[in-house]
Image (cartoon, helix red, strand yellow):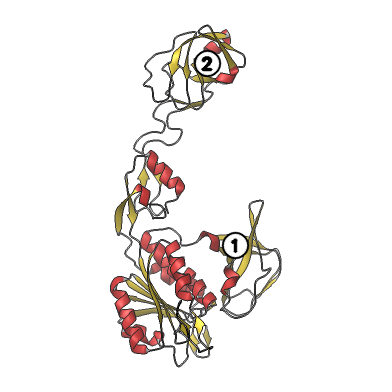
Amino acid sequence: MSITGVDFISYETSQNMLELLQVNNHRYERVPLSDSLGRVLAEDIIAEYNDPQFATASMDGYAVRYEDLQKGELVVLGDNPAGHDETRVLGEGESIKTFTGSMMPEGSDTLIQIENVTFEDGRIIIHEMVEQGNAVRPVGEGYKAGEILIEKGTKITFAEIGVLAGLNCVMVKVALRPRVAVIATGSEILDLGENSDNPAQIRSSNNYTLAALFESAGAEVIQLGTAPDDKDAIMQTFENALESADILVSTGGVSVGDYDFVKDIIPRLGAEVVYKGVGIKPGRHILVAQRGQKFILALPGFAYSSTVTAILYALPLIAKMQGKQRAYKKVAAKLQEDFKKRSQFTEFTACNVVVEDGEYFVNFEGKKVGSSAILVNMLHNSGLMIAGEEDKFLEKGTYVSVILLDEL
């Protein structure tokens, strides 16, 4: 599409082109298990043995042969504590007191819990029967040898830590953190801690918002702060950043104003522009460029615009570099009220996400309508509702796609 002489590719095309970009996603390091939380696995985790490796008691009781329960009472041969290498073989009419986590004795196939029996004079009297195999974990109940337990590209959470510990993984192979440099450009921007008597200047939030977003996605962030509208200074800052960063993300300077220098600087850096201008709202003047294995993303200056475009375009690159399958979670949700689209572009609107009986719903209660600077719309369990180019008016009850912000 073309507006005022500027050509915009569609959102779908921009995402397809982003997906096709070749990145170096084979870089990895080995870190101690205790340092792997939040990192991304660089290899499949495959079980080397069954879990459990032998039939195991899942509660305290007496190991018995199921066919003997009908006798009503059984001889107790002794105790079988957890961790004990039990070698006794149960014969007819015999039992062994066996504790949670213990190996089931050879010959036994069932465990009758303590509360179902009474112990008297070296024997148990059975008061309540149980089913065959009761309270016994079979071999391989948790997982079997050769099974892929955790796939490459998985972000390590508490559950992965637990499984890896159970597998005795001392060191874990994880993807290197992509290095992302972040800078906010514009002479009107004041960095944190700076003071000015000029009421026209505004406090910078973009570089801190995006740094937090990228760190949450697993990147190592290089915080460059702010830069005034000076073409030579910005160019030198960009060149220095690209020496060490995999991705350079800037905000401001990509529109069509006299002081929007960033769009002119990027080609001078020897970077190839992948595309400039996407039919989205907010952020249609976004620019994506590549120089070798490095990427430059020039995002709009307004806070909401820069954050939305960072989610849509920076997070997928960060995910690709770590071998992750997806950058964010997108769900189908039902509108709880009518929605009227404000533009001819694909729109990303902040919404409230509600889950009822396992189904997602969205509404816009308390969300402010205005410019692309309203970052507070992303607070309070919000999502980004996607309305396509062809959408005009969406009735209550319509299903829409929503990016969940609380799972980034």
Q: Is residue 343 left or right of residue 187?
A: right
Q: Amino acid at mark 2?
A: Tyr
Q: Which structural element holds mark 2? A: helix
The residue labelled by disc 1 is 381
In the picture, residue 223 is in which quadrant?
A: bottom left
In the picture, residue 187 is in which quadrant?
A: bottom left
Q: Report the number of discs.
A: 2
Label 2 packing within 10 angstroms: few (<14), some (14-19), many (20+): some
The residue labelled by disc 2 is 66
Residue at (30, 57) in percent of width and height: 28
Q: Position of residue 209 (x, y in %)?
A: 48, 71
Q: Is residue 290 left or right of residue 8?
A: left
Q: Nearer the viewer, residue 81 or 271?
A: 81
Residue at (34, 40) in percent of width and height: 168
Q: Residue lying at the far bottom in this picture: please name it.
A: 258
Label 1 packing within 10 angstroms: few (<14), some (14-19), many (20+): some
Residue at (28, 74) in percent of width and height: 243
Q: Look at discs 1 and 2 and give the one toward the viewer.
A: 1
Q: Amino acid at mark 1?
A: Asn
Q: Position of residue 94 (x, y in %)?
A: 48, 10
In the picture, residue 295 is in which quadrant?
A: bottom left
Q: Nearer the viewer, residue 299 or 165?
A: 165
Tell me the tag on residue 37: none
Q: Position of residue 164 (x, y in %)?
A: 38, 43
Say if 254 sits above or below 395 in the image.
below
Q: CA distance from mark 1 to mark 2?
A: 53 Å
Q: Is residue 225 visible?
A: yes
Q: Position of residue 399 (x, y in %)?
A: 64, 63
Q: Which structural element holds mark 1? A: loop
Reading the chain from its start, which is encountered first: label 1 or label 2? 2
Say if 162 sits above or below 198 in the image.
above
